[in-house]
Amino acid sequence: MFNLEKSGTFTLGDRIVKRLGYGAMQLAGKGVFGPPKNRAEAIAVLREAVESGVNHIDTSDFYGPHVTNQIIKEALHPYKNDLAIVTKIGAARGADASWNPAFSKEALTQAIHDNLNNLGLDVIEVVNLRAMFDAHGPAEGSLEEPLTVLADLQRQGLVKHIGLSNVTAKQVADGRKITSIVCVQNQYNLVHREDDPLIDQLAAEGTAYVPFFPLGGFSPLQSSTLSDVATRLGATPMQVALAWLLQRAPNILLIPGTSSRIHLRENLAVADLVLPADALKKLDGIASAKAA
């Protein structure tokens, strides 16, 4: 059993979760579309994650679509009392596997009910509204209408807490005028560090920050510096990249995803990996070198 307590805990809504969680996106098929190659392995990964102490799972009903949530239900329902399942809405998948904005009241309401049905829940712990103004990352645009719809679904008792995904600092501030925002989920890793100021602000406020693509996403992080540090510490480059995130700020909650139990174990072993000061300094220089 991995000692995930070593990596610490943080508040997510009204839950205290371990900072090493699990992202379910890779449980779907290629391109996050259709069924997985090995459904039995997907179920085994989820069960081992929870048995190892993970109590924060990130998912969405547009993974598949529907596939990932159905696998989570098959693997883990009835859920442990301390398990926080977080989903996101605001997008829909086309028949060609495209990712399309789905911000209408009807689409958002249907998305909540789809998540509830496929996960086998009466209420969702946290729902992230994902902004879709730009395919390549956060972009300014008003979230007032969709966030108002989500806040109304919260008042109906279908959603406990609300977060935002793929957003700017201004959108977070504007969103808080409508409802309480308990987490922000954006792309962030050793190289992609545009959110440094936002992370520090959220940390000061006690708000969770959940980086997606913590290992680089569909193009894994590649750096000779990262590889050198990993070799010296007897770890893999990906383990070092995750450990750096844990040491970057106390409010960062990790959700590395995998469809393999072997990779799951490698990810969870990061709880025991502490990066010395000189290693942190070298790793911090990766983003600076990229920007130069």
Image (spheres, rainbow, N blue to C red):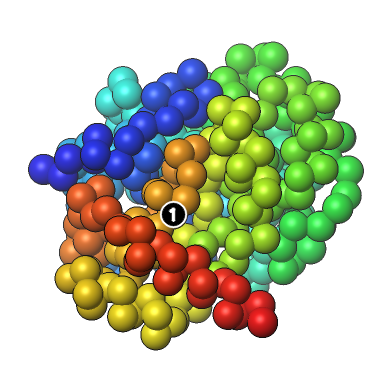
- Could you tell whether 138 is left or right of 85 in the image? right
Image coords of residue 224 (percent x, y):
39, 85
224 up-or-down from 285: above or below: below
Residue 206 found in image quarter: top right
* Residue bearing mark 1: 245
Query: What crowding class fits label 1: few (fewer than 14 Cα within 10 Å), some (14-19), or many (20 or more)?
Result: some
The residue most toward the left is 1
Point out the image quarter for the N terminus: top left
Residue at image x 23%, y 77%? Answer: 231
Image coords of residue 272 (percent x, y):
20, 50
Residue at image x 40%, y 80%? Answer: 225
Residue 31 in view: no
Point out the image quarter for the C terminus: bottom right
194 up-or-down from 18: above or below: below
Looking at this view, is 216 or 67 the one in front? 216
Residue at image x 31%, y 20%? Answer: 81
Residue 73 found in image quarter: top left
Image coords of residue 170 (percent x, y):
82, 43
Q: Amino acid at mark 1?
A: Leu
Find numbered disc 1 in the image and state the secondary structure of the residue it sits on: helix
Residue 136 in view: yes
- Could you tell whether 280 is left or right of 81 in the image? right
Residue at image x 43%, y 34%? Answer: 85
Looking at this view, is 133 or 153 the one in front? 133
Looking at this view, is 70 or 279 the one in front? 279
Image coords of residue 175 (percent x, y):
78, 32
The residue most toward the bottom is 224
Residue 267 found in image quarter: bottom left
